[in-house]
């Protein structure tokens, strides 16, 4: 009888009937205000648009589950403000941008890029007490063709980092930004949690399978071999070094890094160019179930970043029919295929998932640090400490 009971232990026969209600780790995935990860992410700068997205036409942007209005005043200053006007709440999406700021359509209150109320035209003398109100705003700073915002506690605002790989340019190179896809072609906004993409950065073992053999060679042949991988913690995140023996006896060494909070630092897998990594991709959580990527990279021709597209059966991702997406899946299919927020309760992490485990542990430690009143890794409060040198790149040795 005991034997029968043992055999009938839920799950021992693998029947799907025994599946428990699945769940995900909210602490690691949810990005809204007041959530643990949301608060951690708010300690860093995030790109909220391309420089060209900040114009005289107010634009709605959604970042970390907050809807905001991005604009650029007549003096060229970018501004990011809470959409609901602090007077009586209509949206500044219908506002008019002027030299000094954005004017609400309803009663004409004028706010500068830091939310100061400059005019209340329906009030005597243009509003004698207008200094008493302030439109909620976030600081922005521009760099690498992107507009970055800091949405955290003002007193913990770090310096916007500069990255060696985007600062040290060879002759003929310049830095451009791109937001056209999540990478390898593909969609601009992916309908799944940002962490699914970010974990992919430290999952080098999927490269020879998903990108090397399963759907044909999506990158270059060189990437199709199964690598030997070493995972390490660095000062900013998790680093994976993949070694592949070459037919000529040399070693192809590829270093990729997941830099906290969301930076994908991966050398271009398609072009036979060696040396320091040439681009950084910021994984921007739009909300809990959508993300997009902003890339900045060193290029020689305008539009080069948008042109770097993988081929799936000879086509770009956008050219595939639904049937071909099923037959030739890539990163978009694999990551959105995990669901809107993957069920961590149903995972079985194994040794080749070491990078993913290390990244989760590193995040947990930063969540603990925040809870204990400390700053997370990688934030710097002095200009000279905000210059970031990374090891990412690819080398033939
Ligand atoms: S609601 Fe914006 S000025 Fe009145
Ligand atoms: Fe991938």
Image: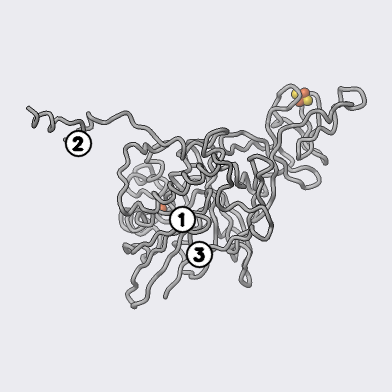
Q: Is mark 1 in CB contact (under 8 Å) with mark 3?
A: no
* Residue 150 relative to residue 186: left or right: right
* Residue 53 relative to residue 241: left or right: right
Q: At numbered mark 1, what does the secondary structure look like: helix, strand or loop?
A: strand
The residue lying toward the viewer, choosing from 115 and 310, is 115
Q: Is residue 362 visible?
A: yes
Estimate how packed mark 3 is, as few (under 14), some (14 to 19) or many (20 or more) residues with alpha carbons within 10 Å: some
Residue under label 3, please give it: 391
User: What is the quadrant of the C terminus in the image?
Assistant: bottom left
* Residue 324 relative to residue 128: left or right: left
**From mark 1 to mark 3, how far is it between C-alphas?**
11 Å
**From mark 2 to mark 1, how far is it between C-alphas?**
34 Å
Return the x and y of residue 318 as percentages of the image width and height. 45, 47
Residue under label 1, please give it: 238
The extreme right residue here reads: 125
- For the point 76% across and 24% down, the residue is 87
**Is label 2 within 8 A of ligand 2 (CB to nearest ligand atom)?**
no
- Of the numbered discs 1 and 3, the one sitting upstream in the chain is 1
Estimate how packed mark 1 is, as few (under 14), some (14 to 19) or many (20 or more) residues with alpha carbons within 10 Å: many
- Of the numbered discs 2 and 1, the one sitting upstream in the chain is 2
Return the x and y of residue 290 as percentages of the image width and height. 50, 38
Colour convention of the picture: one colour
- For the point 63% across and 72% down, the residue is 171
Q: Is residue 106 visible?
A: no
Residue under label 2, please give it: 14
Q: At numbered mark 3, what does the secondary structure look like: helix, strand or loop?
A: loop
Residue 99 found in image quarter: top right
- Of the numbered discs 3 and 2, the one sitting upstream in the chain is 2
**Is label 1 within 8 A of ligand 2 (CB to nearest ligand atom)?**
no
Q: At numbered mark 2, what does the secondary structure look like: helix, strand or loop?
A: loop
């Amino acid at each position: 009888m005991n034997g029968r009971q043992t055999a009938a232990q839920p799950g021992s026969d693998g029947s799907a009937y025994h599946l428990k209600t699945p769940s995900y780790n909210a602490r690691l995935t949810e990005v809204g205000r007041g959530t643990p990860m949301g608060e951690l992410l708010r300690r860093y700068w995030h790109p909220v648009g391309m420089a060209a997205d900040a114009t005289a036409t107010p634009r709605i942007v959604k970042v970390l589950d907050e809807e905001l209005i991005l604009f650029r005043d007549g003096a060229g200053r970018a501004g990011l403000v809470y959409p609901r006007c602090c007077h009586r709440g209509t949206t500044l999406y219908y506002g008019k941008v002027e030299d000094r700021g954005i004017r609400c359509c309803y009663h004409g209150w004028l706010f500068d890029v830091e939310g100061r109320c400059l005019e209340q035209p329906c009030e005597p003398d243009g509003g004698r007490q207008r200094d008493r109100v302030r439109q909620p705003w976030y600081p922005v700073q521009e760099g690498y063709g992107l507009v970055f915002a800091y949405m955290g506690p003002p007193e913990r605002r770090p310096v916007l980092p500069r990255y060696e790989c985007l600062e040290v340019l060879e002759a003929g190179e310049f830095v451009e930004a791109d937001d056209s896809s999540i990478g390898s072609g593909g969609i601009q906004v992916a309908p799944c949690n940002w962490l699914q993409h970010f974990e992919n950065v430290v999952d080098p073992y999927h490269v020879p399978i998903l990108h090397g053999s399963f759907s044909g060679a999506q990158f270059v042949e060189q990437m199709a071999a199964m690598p030997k991988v070493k995972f390490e913690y660095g000062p900013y995140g998790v680093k994976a070094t993949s070694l592949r023996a070459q037919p000529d006896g040399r070693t192809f060494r590829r270093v990729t890094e997941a830099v906290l909070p969301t930076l994908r630092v991966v050398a271009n897998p398609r072009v036979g160019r060696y040396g320091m990594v040439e681009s950084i991709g910021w994984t921007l959580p739009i909300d809990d179930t959508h993300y997009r990527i902003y890339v900045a990279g060193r290029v020689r021709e305008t539009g080069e970043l948008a042109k770097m597209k993988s081929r799936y059966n000879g086509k770009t991702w956008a050219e595939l029919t639904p049937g071909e997406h099923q037959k030739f899946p890539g990163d978009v299919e694999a990551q959105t295929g995990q669901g809107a927020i993957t069920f961590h309760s149903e995972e079985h992490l194994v040794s080749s998932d070491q990078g993913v485990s290390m990244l989760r542990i590193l995040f947990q430690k930063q969540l603990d640090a925040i809870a204990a009143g400390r700053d997370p890794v990688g934030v710097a409060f002095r200009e000279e400490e905000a210059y970031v040198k990374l090891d990412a790149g690819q080398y033939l040795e």
